[in-house]
Image (cartoon, rainbow, N blue to C red):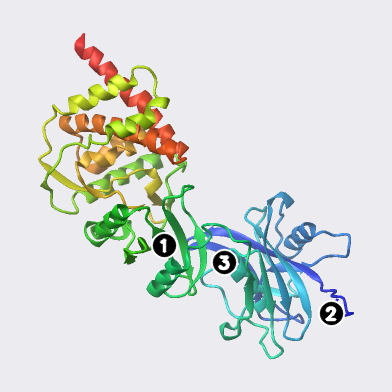
Amino acid sequence: MSSTQRHTEPLDVHLIAVRDGAAGPEVLLSRRAGNVYASGCWHLVSGHLDGPWEDMVTALVREAREEAGVVVDPADVRAAVTVHHRAPAGGARIGVFFEVKRWEGTPEVMEHHVCDAMGWFSFVALPEPMVAYCRAGLDAYRAGARMAVHFQEPDDPIAYDRSVDRLVLVPEPAVRGAVPAQAVRAFAEQAVGRITAWTDVSWAREESRVWRAVGSEGGEWYVKIHQNDRFHQREVAALRSWASGLGAAAPRLVAADPTLRAVVLTAVGGRTLHGAVHPPEQQRRIFHRIGQVAAAIHHSAPARPAADGLPLGKLERHLAGALPHLVPGDERFIRATTEAATGLAPLKTVLPTHGDFQLRNLRWDETADTLYVIDFERSEDGPAVRDFVRLSDAWHGRPDLFQAVMDGYGRPFTPEEEAQLTVLSVLDAVSGISYGTAHGDPELVERGLRTRTSRWRRSRASRSSARS
């Protein structure tokens, strides 16, 4: 031991109550008043433990009830961040901050002698003045840290002051992918300024990486590393040309580095439609908008003469990877379908296509009633119907959703497009099963298998009817 004095810091608990607001997440704050420490400053609902018999979670639940009049179930309390704090006067303490997103009751001031206001505030527009200790806990929470040190100096103000911010985040053990490599971080900060928080939002596979980056002033961007040069070139080309015609429905390219295969993109709003649940009427409205966005993509640049036909060249390689998952008769049907494709009328023109137009890459903002499309790395010229291949899985068994897409698109498929859609669906299912198996993407495999059992069987049935 370097000293004979043992530390006996008090322990206090802080409630980070979070709700969804019109402009993003909001946190509940109260303003201290009367003959108390930091009177006039905003702070979280907080307090000390009532003696050695009360645990941290019990204390938090009690303080939430006593100060804000809300009932919190202990099962809904989540650990957020622990801060070792020292006040300007020299006293130190341990603050344990807890996140809570569910409670009963409406928050209101319950202790008027020590609090004169309470309200919800956006994390990017916190009120002033705020207790520096409280602000340190919120900043550490937003940065995703689990532990932090906030030791103020004797002359520091009690209220938060950016010029004397003493917050030091304690790093966690290295986790692969938690932040990008130094070269990518430097590239992103050259484009948008200092980034204070990184969140890995990649799909669980190795090839490409995506991070959500939050700047020191609260701005938000996405930083993406493409798995190969081809995908990088496709996305950059699309975002620099026809995708800009989609306006706010698509992200804007902020910067690109071909050596790193990295891009910085503006963040779009909404939430992914992948796995989202909406009432039937709202679903139809969303799918109508999907049809409109598809039409906007296909009319974003003039049609060009077609150079090639349907993409049949990779069939054998994909079929070899998919065969273990196919049932008897599938291979014969696949080959017959692709052979029939050679008899289709050749493509005369091609249009800009997204290439991966599916619910994964579509985001819906309920408040703004707006649809956003992301991820242009498979974009290339092709038949318009190409963008409905992966989307068709979303309307399977729902003719009302299919009709909503067609109404939004402004026209039905032509007979030639119907034939192209069948061939492209078969090819996409085979490649999806093969790729998903090799790269650990079970959802992609399952989608391919659904296509096998739906569209393939319908095609077989229609052929049988035609022969009879």
Q: Secondary structure at mark 2?
A: loop
**Would you call the spot at circle 2 few (<14 residues within 10 Å), some (14-19), or many (20 or more)?**
few
| Horizontal side of residue 169 vs 239, given as left or right | right
| Horizontal side of residue 464 vs 147, given as left or right | left
- The answer to whether residue 246 of the structure is visible from this angle is no
Towards the viewer: 159 or 146: 146
Residue under label 1, please give it.
223
Q: 309 above or below 196?
A: above
Residue under label 3, please give it.
143
Towards the viewer: 359 or 325: 325
Q: Amino acid at mark 3?
A: Ala
**Sequence-wise first label, 1 or 3:** 3
Q: Amino acid at mark 2?
A: Ser
Residue under label 2, please give it.
2
Q: Which residue is at 42% across, 45% downward?
A: 273
Distance, label 2 to label 1, CA atoms, is 46 Å
The answer to which quarter of the image holds residue 344 is top left
Towards the viewer: 84 or 311: 311
**Sequence-wise first label, 3 or 2:** 2
Camera-side mark, 3 or 2: 2
| Location of residue 296 in the rendering, given as x and y in whole percent from the top left corner | 23, 51
Q: Amino acid at mark 1?
A: Val
The N terminus sits in image quarter: bottom right
Q: Which residue is at 27% across, 36% downward?
A: 314
Camera-side mark, 1 or 3: 1
The C terminus sits in image quarter: top left
Q: Secondary structure at mark 1?
A: strand
Distance, label 1 to label 3, CA atoms, is 16 Å
**Sequence-wise first label, 2 or 1:** 2
Q: Secondary structure at mark 3?
A: loop
Q: Which residue is at 11% across, 35% downward?
A: 346
The answer to which quarter of the image holds residue 405 is top left
